[in-house]
Amino acid sequence: MEGVKEEQPSSPYMAMFEGFRAELDEHHDRREKIIKASRDITASSKKIIFTLQRVRNLGEPVPQFVVKNNTQYWKTIESQYQSIAADLQGLNRHRYRQITGGNQEFMEALSFHHYLETQTLISYDASAARVATMSGEAGAVELTAEDYILGIFDMVGELMRFSITSMATNGKLPAGKPNQDKRIKREVSEEHTGDKMDINVQTSALTLAPEPRNVLSDLRELRLQLEMFEPPRGAKFYDEVEKKMKVMRECVDKVEKALYSLTVRGKERPKGWMPDANEDRRAIVESY
Amino acid sequence: MTGQSGMVDPAIFEDLQTRVDEDTAVRDELKDIVQALEKHNRTISFVLSRAHSTPTANLSSVLNAAQESIQKAIGTVTALSRSASKLPYYKFNSMWSRQVQDLIFGILFWGWLGGYQSNASTPKCGRLLTLPDLSIILAVPVNLKDRDEFHLTIEEYLQALISLVEELSRLARNSVTLGDYERPLLINQFVKDVLAGFQILNLKNDTLRRRSDGLKYKVKDVEDVVYDLSLRDLLPKGKVEGYVKVEGVKQEVKEEESSKKIKMEEYE
């Protein structure tokens, strides 16, 4: 060993390796900082989702207790994005993919929140813009299309849980408000078909309110879109999509099965035994 | 399907599909270049493998042949650099990193054997080409920080350096077979110097760490060759510059041997 010790300082490559050491240390420090931020963003996003699962209504601003509880977590996420924004600029924009975990979980929380309030899917551009805003002045942390899609896959799981909880506690699937649905329809009609749809709105206002969309129909629509999406072959992203696709289908299946048993059990019951409120519910359920 | 009547605005997924398809097109374009580079690398390693069976005196022809293949590879690197510089470097670099490492290794080996800027009739072994040297040879920047373009990274260089040590430990044995008892001494000193460099790096649990952990075994392999030569008194005396150091090694090895003996005795 003595020999080695003596030789070490005399290695002609020492200066070169000292340079490498400085560079690599800097790189590893940055990497670890980003891993930590990603974990914190993930943890806060999970807490946000947890609170959101206590929401029971669709298509309206989330109740005050949710806002009160989640504000701190949104703030944590924002400060985490800010803390790493400078490290993910220029050449290093795509260098530390360790942020993808945090990005995906954040995407899940953001899209779930957005869905509960508007009953629509938040767009990629809006999501990326949101992360950019949170990143602050140092420049935007990149939310990739891959992060977005993988986050949306996970959001299907949240919609499943949301539906099952609702069926177990209220005996029905959460659905949008008829009023709101009509409002959306009117917007669409003005944009695209003009007068023709106005008549529909009038007639539907005259007759019964139009059937509001429920979570299952939204889930089916989302499933269709996700199934139509073609990830690039051979990339790691492809395998991730494959895996999540399977889970996503299972989630939709679970809701369909739960609804099936709700319907079948409803039929079994003697008429007079059911409370009035539930009678209505059954009528809705049967017509899916 | 126009406009949004349900939950999902179809434009969202149309846009995502376009983005992903664009990336795929970029990857397909790069794939051709990277495959060409791989082919050049195979030729270089084929040519340079003759160094294991060629005496130093006749090495020039091998090195000249290697230089020709390296020249072709450089052309491909230029094409790669041109295409890749239009893209975010770290989004796509995993596509070519392996091939670039292999090429760097080929050039390092060639340079070590004396191929670079050598006018002597008998090439002089033992030179380590640095990252700045490679930057000149390949005509690409190294270790960039301020702009997002194609470049060589420190990690790629270090990976190639590990490959070089592995290759040299093989060359040490084969030199003896060729009757060259001098080169193992040179290799011995070189790999020790490189190992000393790697020992000051703080590597994390990645491929670089795993491969560099294997370096000490390669260094030991070379030491064993030198030891075998010294046992049989085959080391060229007074001829080699590093002879004093080699004496040290011999001493060390002998000490190790004697300590082994002591241990054996203890067991008995």
Image (cartoon, rainbow, N blue to C red):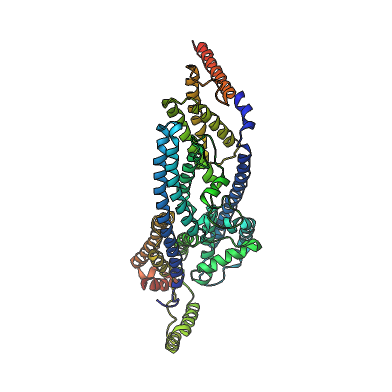
Estimate the x, y position of residue A196 in percent, counting from the top left: 42, 88
Residue closest to the eye, B261 or A163 = B261
- Classify B125 as above or below B42: above
Where is residue A51? Give x, y as percent. 56, 60
- Look at the image and tell me in which quarter the C terminus of chain A lies: bottom left
Name the quadrant containing residue A206.
bottom left
Please state if B176 lies on the left or on the right of B197 as rendered. Answer: left
Quarter occupied by the N terminus of chain A: top right
A24 or B40: nearer the eye?
Answer: B40
Q: Looking at the picture, does residue B231 appear above or below residue A116?
A: above
Residue B196 position within the rendered picture, expressed as x and y whole percent measured from the top left? 58, 33
In this picture, residue B143 sits left or right of residue A166: right
Quarter-wise, where is residue A9 in the image?
top right
Residue A53 in sight from this viewpoint: no
Q: Residue at x 42, y 29 (%)?
A: B174
Residue B241 appears in the picture as rendered: yes
Q: Quadrant of residue A212?
A: bottom left
Identify which residue, B52 or B105, lies in the foreground: B52
**Camera-nearest residue between B60 and B197:** B60
